[in-house]
Image (cartoon, grey):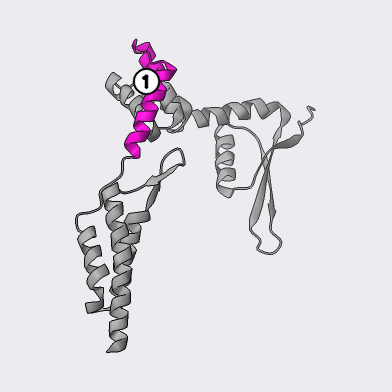
Amino acid sequence: MQELEPFIVYRELSDGDEATNLADQLEQGKIPYQMLTDGDDETGALKSFLFLLPLGRFTDADKVLDAAAADKPDSPEKRAQFIDQLSKSDLIEILDNPFGWDPRDVACARQSLEKLGVVYTNEELHAKRTASLLRIRTPEHPAPWLLPLGFMLAFGGGIIGMAFHGIGIGIGYFLWCMKTTDPTGQKYPTYDETTRNQGLFMTIFGTAAFLFWSLLRVDS
């Protein structure tokens, strides 16, 4: 009688969904397995999933999992196939705007272009990356209604209610100090210099107007 091969630890997971997916993949690959679970004594919730397989089936299990991973839409293989099917202009667009893409996609685009006879040096790619970053850092213009509304509330809010002064001053401060983080993690002013100056003016003189209306209300 042939002795059964003992089951030994293959993987330990802490996420229930990952454990369910692994079990499904092993079953689809007809890989025998045992799953042991460990729960929290207080809540009863499962906190670990231990998968045991015969040692001789580890390689088969790895192949099944690798094949499942490669078949995912976001797997490196699938992404490379997608990039390789793009037109030359689309591939150049990826290199012109690399921050909108995964670094692996950018590398695939470069390789695909080289197959088409379009070769960029590292210096040229660095220049494209710098130009793209400068475009991203271009300051914005606020919505057309925001500045008039901010000035109206900052200076005349006392007529309809002191709380409106705070809203106007807040708009001014927002336009003056708001910053955006670029893909490299660096912060830059969100709005153009003219808008920031108007926001500063709105903040300072809106605060003065707030004090004026406050004193006026106290005297009355």
Quarter holding the C terminus?
bottom left
What percent of the width, then of the height, locates residue 37?
68, 50
Main secondary structure along the magenta-highlighted residues: helix
Label 1, secondary structure: give it: helix
* Magenta span includes 174: no
Name the side, left or right, on which 154 lies relative to 43.
left
Q: Nearer the viewer, residue 108 or 162?
A: 162
Name the side, left or right, on which 28 lies relative to 99.
right
* Magenta span includes 127: yes
Q: Amino acid at mark 1?
A: Asp
> Magenta part of the protein: which range?
110-137
| Above or below, comparing residue 197 to residue 100 in the picture | below
Q: Nearer the viewer, residue 208 or 34?
A: 208
Quarter residue 22 falls in: top right
What percent of the width, then of the height, locates residue 188?
39, 45
| Above or below, comparing residue 208 to residue 118 in the picture | below
Q: State whether residue 81 appears in this view.
A: no
Quarter residue 119 falls in: top left
Q: Nearer the viewer, residue 17 or 89?
A: 89
- What residue would you read off at disc 1? 84
Q: Nearer the viewer, residue 153 or 104?
A: 153
Quarter residue 172 falls in: bottom left
| Above or below, comparing residue 156 to residue 67 in the picture | below
